[in-house]
Amino acid sequence: MPLCAFSVLLCVTILLSGCDKGIAPKSGEAGFSGIITFIGQWPDSVTRTHLVIFKDPLNSSADFSLQNLRYVSNEIPFGTTTYNFSSKDSSVIPGTGLFEPGEYAYVAVAQQTTENVSLIRADWFVVGVYYKNNDTTKPGTLVIPENTFVENINIICDFNNPPPQPPGGK
C-alpha cells in the first residue's frame, strides 16, 4: 500500500473511531415540567386559568405584555385540584413554538374573570407563583440550561392565601 493511501486510511480510521461528536449539539430539548396544586375553593367568576412565564420581572403593568411573555400553558380546567404540566406537551409559545433556554424572572398561575381573552394586566389575577427553594419572599427565577429539561417546577395556588399581585392589578 502506498504511503499516501496508508496515511489517508489511518486518518479516516482515527476520525471514525475517536469521534465523540465533539462540538455537535447534545440531543435533548430545553424545557420544564411540574405540578400545580390548587388549595381551597375556586372562585365562580374565573373564566380561564393558565401558567404564564415572563422573561423580565413584572415591575409595572407595562411589563405584563406580549413582548415580555414567553410561555402560556394550555387552559387549566376549572375546579382542578392538581395539574401536571410540561412545556413539551402543553404549550402555546409566542414565536417559534419551542421553549428556549435562558432565565425567566416570573412564573405564575394567572386567572382571568372577563369573557374576552386579553393581555390587559387588570383583567388577570395571580393565584400562584413559582418560588425557588421555598423562598416565598420573591418570585423564583426559572433557569433552563441549553439542551436541559428541568423538572419539579411546582407551584401551590392557595385561594385562601393568594400571593402578592404584580403592579397594575385590581
Image (cartoon, grey):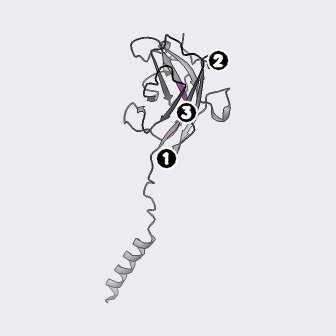
Q: Amino acid at mark 2?
A: Asn
- Give the secondary structure at mark 3: strand
Q: Residue at x 51, y 23 (%)?
A: 80
Location of residue 133 in the rendering, given as x and y in whole percent from the top left corner: 66, 35
- Give the secondary structure at mark 1: loop
* Residue range of the region highlighted in magenta in the rendering: 97-108
Quadrant, the N terminus: bottom left
Location of residue 56 in the rendering, given as x and y in whole percent from the top left corner: 52, 29
Q: Residue at x 56, y 20 (%)?
A: 127
- Magenta highlight on residue 99: yes
Q: As rendered, which of 40 and 123 lies closer to the eye? A: 40
How dense is the environment of label 1, judged by Cα within 10 Å: few (below 14), some, or many (20 and up)? some
Q: As rendered, which of 112 and 79 lies closer to the eye? A: 79
Is 44 displayed left or right of 10 in the figure? right
Q: Residue at x 63, y 34 (%)?
A: 132
Q: Amino acid at mark 1?
A: Glu
Location of residue 138 in the rendering, given as x and y in whole percent from the top left corner: 64, 27
Q: Quick one: label 1 or label 3, which is nearer the N terminus?
A: 3
Quadrant, the C terminus: top right
- Mark 1 vs mark 3, foreground winner is 3
Q: Quick one: label 1 or label 2, which is nearer the N terminus?
A: 1
Q: Quick one: label 2 or label 3, which is nearer the N terminus?
A: 3
- Residue under pointer 1: 146
Is 16 displayed left or right of 126 in the figure? left
Question: What's the mark number on residue 35?
Answer: 3
- Mark 1 vs mark 2, foreground winner is 2
